[in-house]
Amino acid sequence: MGKFQLPLFGAVARKKRACFFSLHPKDKAKKFSAYAPKAMTHFATKYGLPVLEDPADLAAFDLVFFSLHCFRDFYLIARMAHHKRTGQEWIAGGNACATPAGVGWVMDYVWVGDCRESFARILDGEREMEGMYDPRFPDRPVRYIDEDLHTEALSPSMMEMSKGCPRRCLFCIHPWRHRYQEAPVEAVEKFVREFPKMRLGLMSNSSDDVSYYERVADLLTETNKQDMTVSNAVQSFSERIAKQRKADMLFGVEGVSERLRWIVNKPISQALLRDKVDLCLRHAGKVRLIYQFNLPGEEPRDFDEFERDVAYFNATHTKGAVALTFIPNQPTAHTPFQWLTPRYSLATQDRLMALRGRLIGSGKTGLGLYLPTPLGPRSWFSQVVAEWIAVTPKVDAAVAKLPARAEVPEMVDRLAAAGVDLPPAFLKRDRDTVFPWSNIITTGDDPAKWKRYEGMLRKLSGARFANTSTPAPEAWDR
């Protein structure tokens, strides 16, 4: 792929009327809600830009910014695309736009990567910039902009404590998209001291990966403040931190069994997991556990182990709360998992929903165990599709007509019958596959990604994985 040199547009004084468009209603845009993209709220506040919610109001603006929160937002864009007037410029950003093919058909540009240092230039009219994806040249290489971590708060109640990840979980975008960085501890401490309320946000992929987090935790205790600890490392979550917690704690467990966690490069033993959950429940009394299903090599015996863990928590603790959140695995662009063929196990979904039913009301007699409804096959499939093809109104309509429950090959066939064809690589990938996001060059792009994927395949075919036995699940009786 060659490098095209586009003509310079030149800086345009802020004569153009600019705005953000929010794809989610205000009643969902709470302070700590995932429905309020942090970049949108930050830039709109900093530069005095209005945030619109009614597409009918867009006509008065020349430049419209979109901060896309997830792939489902691509479909919301498709439903409002007809509101784009002649001469109006649309620019998208957000984490989902590391794979910009889905919205390139309607956007004039897509910003790829961090944007705090670049947003003012974009607002002033500069377009020929590193990190700017131009849909007119979809194969032109674009480098993901990995800015140095800023100490400026994202909002009055939230700042970034770290970004990236020092580990290499195979499914996760964080270590492969940008390098690991920590904000200066002095900046974090200043933010904690000056924040006037009890609850605040210190953004991090994993709080206990941050080298100085215990120091920050001591300060939070001293000032009678709390953040939510996100513990993706799990192993390093300590008694000292647990004793200081009054807010929720979140553990990124991922695999439902010890052997699946080993496969995805997140080696958390069953004994360690139980020990850390026990630690949380003894002190704060509540914890959130995040799991994935549809992982490679997953079998019924893996879910058996998870059910035994649930039975153990229920038998060991008579009060408190454990939320068990399940996310169906999606082969993630720019990671070793991008070579996985997407699949959704209806049998696992059935088993999750059956367990969910058995857990209802558990808090009335003992430990409260809650399993939210996992994302269903059609919604999950729509996200996978959005990485591969342009999400036009035609695609949106075809996806909306898919059955709520179906295996991936059937949904691919149904889209084809509706005139929407996915590329052959969607269901068959190898080392030479050219992905729709192959022109996006991230900080973590290196041959190690493929080697790590091959290493996972060797693990799956090895004796240790095949011979790991899982006893039958215990009955759901206390």
Image (cartoon, grey):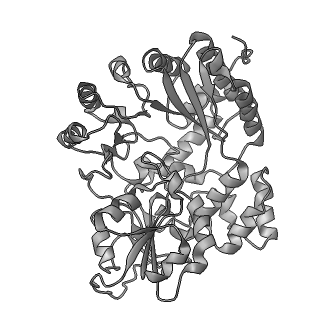
Give how far across and how far down residue 161 sits, in percent.
Answer: 30, 43
In the image, is 169 to the left or to the right of 258? left
Does the rendering let one see residue 291?
A: yes
Picture quarter with the C terminus: top right
Which residue does the image show at 70% across and 48% down from the upper left?
A: 343
Give how far across and how far down residue 472 sits, in percent.
Answer: 74, 17
In the image, is 411 to the left or to the right of 211? right
Give how far across and how far down residue 43 sits, in percent.
Answer: 34, 63
Give how far across and how far down residue 19 sits, in percent.
Answer: 41, 73
The mark total stands at 0
**Quarter occupied by residue 102:** bottom right
**Quarter occupied by residue 187:** top left
Task: Indicate whether 61 appears above or below 365.
Answer: below
In the image, is 335 to the left or to the right of 40? right
Judging depth in this view, the residue of 355 and 385 nearest the camera is 355
Does the rendering let one see residue 107?
A: no
**Quarter occupied by residue 118:** bottom left
Task: Indicate whether 411 appears above or below 474.
Answer: below
Judging depth in this view, the residue of 143 and 61 nearest the camera is 61
Which residue does the image show at 66% across and 37% down from the upper left?
A: 297
Task: Indicate whether 397 appears above or below 478.
Answer: below
Judging depth in this view, the residue of 298 and 127 nearest the camera is 127
Task: Indicate whether 219 appears above or below 389.
Answer: above
